[in-house]
Image (spheres, grey):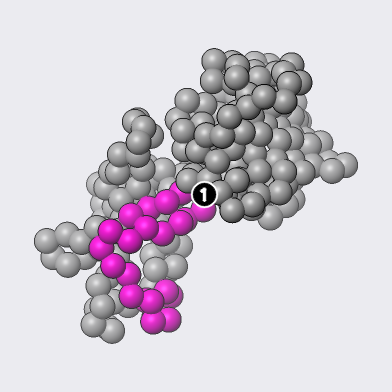
Amino acid sequence: MTRFTTTAGAKLGLQDIGISIDTKSELSPQWLLQYYDEQIEGGRKFKSEETVQIGWMIVQLRSDQNGILEVWEPEFDSIPIRWCLGANNTIRHLILQRSVCDVLNCEPDFPSLRQAGIVSPGFSDCEEFTMSRDTSNANDSGWIFRELGDVGTNGDFESLFQISFSHMEVIPFLALPPGCTVTRRLGGIVIRLGAVTVSSVENDLLQRLLICPVLV
């Protein structure tokens, strides 16, 4: 792991933020460092154990032995959330979700992994599914997840973290705005937003998402 650190805190007598990245990942934390520097310069005082939303992810700040506030992120290997040092998934997911929105030329509308979505009874075990988004409201992200062919009205609320824990394939599409529908079959992905339809037949990113749900 390589750690990058903000610089504004030391200048203002505040704690700086440390962001650790897997050395082999080739991910860049510079935009995240800039975000924290700008927040600190603007007078924001971050605290240990504070959580901050970055994209759809929630990160936690923890003070190390040198007084640096280290970024910890959810590890997608257990429920409830287990925190791990670093920001690899946070950066990876943000890049990917922005890239999917770029495919439809729309602005991202990031939910929070703490928000809920409606899940049909057969969704957790399915390989082919649809996900559609209504307007979000408070703890409701607006997302509805159903196994392909399900037209019922039954469903339970689950956190987006819990849903993505069992179906990593949904992660790239979670920042799509209300009105979007994603259909994922074994042989293809189709996204619809209003009059715009994009499929994996014509789009390289969607084609690659059929093979690996989190590319970056």
Look at 60% across and 46% down and name the residue there: 140
Res 207 visible? no
Front-lying residue, 149 or 198? 149
Quarter of image, res 9: bottom left
Q: Is residue 216 magenta?
A: no
Q: Sort mark 1 into few (<14), some (14-19) or many (20+) by Cα contacts within 10 Å.
A: many
* Image: magenta residue range: 38-60
- The residue sitting at 54% across, 15% down in the picture is 125
Toward the right, the furthest residue is 195
Q: Is residue 18 above or below residue 172?
A: below
Residue 36 placement (x, y as % from top left): 39, 68
SS of the residue under disc 1:
loop
Judge whether 27 appears above or below 50 on screen: above
Above or below residue 212? Residue 32 is below
Specify whether residue 71 is in view. yes
Q: Amino acid at mark 1?
A: Ser
Up the image or down, 74 lies above or below 7; here it is above
Residue at 48% across, 46% down: 114
Q: State left or right for residue 37 relative to residue 140.
A: left
- Is 99 placed left or right of 203 in the picture? left
Q: From the top left corner, tell me how far across and down residue 14 is, in percent.
A: 26, 78
Residue identifier under label 1: 112
- Residue 181 location in percent, x, y? 74, 35
Closest to the observer, 66 or 148? 148
Please name whichever residue, 207 or 44, is drawn nearer the observer in this view of the structure. 44
Magenta span contains residue 41: yes
x 25%, y 63%: residue: 48
In this rendering, the count of numbered labels is 1
